[in-house]
Amino acid sequence: MNSYSSEVEAKMQRLYQSLSEKDRRRYAAIEALKLGWGGINYISQLFGCDDDTIRFGLKELEDETAMNMSEIRRSGGGRKSKVETIEGLDAAFLKVVAEYTAGSPMDETVKWTNLTRQEIALLLTAEGISVSVTVVDQLLERYHYRKRKAQKRLATGEHPQRNEQFENIEHISLCLIRPQAIRF
C-alpha cells in the first residue's frame, strides 16, 4: 500500500476536520478505498477515527437512500427528553409553581415564579418525580415563565454636596476648553 506525503496528509487532515460527521465518514471511506488493502487502518490512524466508522462509510457509499439523506444522522435517534417521557411531570410542575406564581397585570402571558430552579427540582422530588434543573429549565420555557428582574423603586436620596460636585465638573470642563480660566 502506498502512503501519502506529509504535506498531502496535513491537507487531508485539515479538510477532514472541516467536514460534518457524515461527510467525514464518507471521505475517509473513499480514501480507504483508493488505497486498497490496509487503507482502512492507515486512514483510521491518519484521521484519528475508528475503523468501524470507515466501514460504515463504505456501506453508506453503496446505499442509495443513505447517499440521498440530507441530515447528518438518521431521524429518531437519541434518547427522548425527560419532559416527554415522565408521566405526570407537567401536572406536578404546575402544581408546585402554582402557589409561587406571579404575573404582570398588564400582560397575562408574562408570568414568573420566585422559586429557584433547584427549589422547583426539590419540590418535584417531594411529589415523587426526580428531575434535574435542566428539565426544570425546559418546563419553565414550555410554560412561558420568565426570570424576574429586580427593579429599583426607591430614590437614593440627596447628597449634601451634590451641587458642589456639579459645579466642580463644570469648572473642570471649562478649564479644558479655556485653560486661562483655571483658578485655584
Image (cartoon, rainbow, N blue to C red):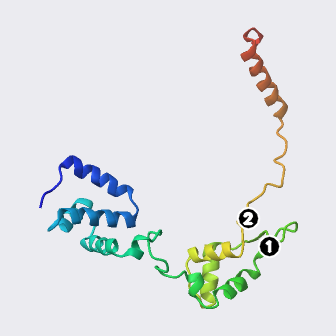
Where residue 74 appears, x then y in whole percent?
Answer: 45, 76
Side (left or right) of 139 relative to 105: left
Q: Quadrant of the N terminus?
A: bottom left
Residue 184: tell me if it is visible: no
Residue 148: image tag: 2
* Amino acid type shown at disc 2: Arg
Look at the numbered disc 1 and give the secondary structure of its residue: strand
Work out whether residue 121 or residue 139 is closer to the camera in this orientation and state it: 139
Which quadrant would residue 142 be assigned to in this image? bottom right
Mark 2 closeness class: few <14, some 14–19, many ≥20 residues within 10 Å: few
Tell me if residue 103 comes above or below residue 35 in the rendering: below
Q: Which residue is mark 1?
A: 102
Q: Which residue is at the front of the view, 54 or 61?
A: 61
For this rendering, which residue is in front, 146 or 174? 146
**Residue closest to the far front:** 64
Q: What is the number of the mark on residue 7? A: none
Q: Residue at x 19, y 49 (%)?
A: 6
Q: Quadrant of the C terminus?
A: top right
Q: Choose the circle earlier in sequence order: 2 or 1.
A: 1
Disc 1 marks a residue whose amino acid type is Ala
Q: Are marks 2 and 1 in contact (CB under 8 Å)?
A: yes
